[in-house]
Amino acid sequence: MIVNGSPWFDVAGQRINAFCGGVIPADGWWWWYGSHYGDGPRGNLAEVGITLYRSRDLAAWERVGTILPVQPHFEHDLHRGCRLERPKIIRHPDGRFVMWFHLVKPGCSHHSAAAGVAEAAHIEGPWSYVGSFQPDGFMLRDMTLLDAGGGEAYVIYAGGRQCRWNRTLHVSLLARDWLGTSGAWTFALPERMTEAPAITRLNGRFWLLGSGCTGWNPNRLRSAVADHPLGPWYELGDPCAPNIEPPDALGYRCQPANIVTIPGWVDRAVLMADRWCAEDHGQNRHIWLPFSVAGGRPRMSWSECWTLPLVRPP
């Protein structure tokens, strides 16, 4: 049973703390990973790192541990107090797991926002930090990864140069080893100030969800579709049905993180989202909602409580 708006707990009775991450199936398990957030208004600064949970059925989650911890050495990119957000993990055809994330080093401005990259032979680790860079010369802020099949993968990120911040979503084809970009890239939703991208492939097309840029405050979500990750992308508007909660909420007071495809579902998936509390990140909440495609448009509706079928990983 999914209960949105309430704290979620693992099988040991501890609060699940894995935000703006994702879920990936591998080796007979579902793996849920994300950024660990602390309490208070500065809880978004990394003091732990990337945490990992696992489940056989998407319902009962067991904490595995911290797979990419912050580091005590000030000269390290992942020094305690960095911004270590939006981790995404995909599996390379050679079997390696590759993680990308949004990184701002401690004491640095968001103009330095970069992609951090790590890899591992097993999702539980050990993970090796590869390094950080600004893909194709652009700062990288909110981001996600897409495994498009056939050995091709893409990073989709809000970026820009100098003071342009999140003005445009970028889509970049990854290099063959998925540890960098290939040089092939395009703009998606130019000048639309879109962040928090989440992407999936359903019915042979690529569907993108995102939010506007209002800091930690909710806003109206937006969506787009393309026949190829490099576009062209066509904006489709707000995917949320009007049965919102509470009555004055926008985007169900949440921000997209990832879209999880479920075995046997053809035109449906699950949106993983985050409900932020800037005054105390210990009050952040996980929000999972049904996501579907009908009539050429994406659709979501608010459900405080709903039943996700107990599905074993493929």
Image: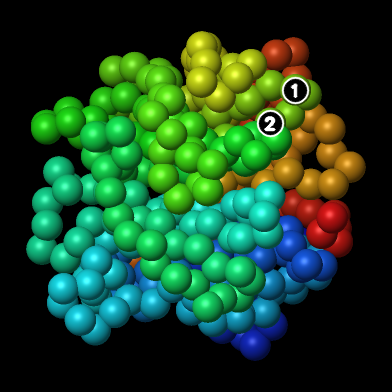
Q: Quadrant of residue 167?
A: top left
Residue 71 shows in this picture = yes
Residue 251 shows in this picture = no
Quadrant of the image containing the C terminus: bottom right
x, y percent for residue 255: 45, 43
How is the protein colored in the picture? rainbow
Q: Residues within 10 Å of mark 2 (few under 14, many from 20)?
A: many
Residue sitting at the far bottom: 12
Mark 2 to mark 1 CA distance (whole Å): 6 Å
The residue at 63%/71% (across/down) is 122
The residue at 11%/32% (across/down) is 162
x, y percent for residue 185: 41, 25
x, y percent for residue 77: 24, 66
Callout 1 secondary element:
loop
Image: 136 above or below 11 = above
Residue sitting at the far right: 264
Callout 2 secondary element:
strand
Do the numbered discs 2 and 1 sit on residues whose CB atoms are within 8 Å?
A: yes
For mark 1, what is the residue? Answer: 204
The residue at 48%/79% (across/down) is 66
- 82 horizontally vs 187: left or right: left
x, y percent for residue 150: 70, 35
- 278 horizontally vs 119: left or right: left
For mark 2, what is the residue? Answer: 201
- 247 horizontally vs 295: left or right: left
Q: Amino acid at mark 2?
A: Arg
Quadrant of the image containing the N terminus: bottom right
Q: Amino acid at mark 1?
A: Gly
Looking at this view, is 70 or 121 the one in front? 121
The residue at 89%/42% (across/down) is 264
Looking at this view, is 146 or 253 the one in front? 146
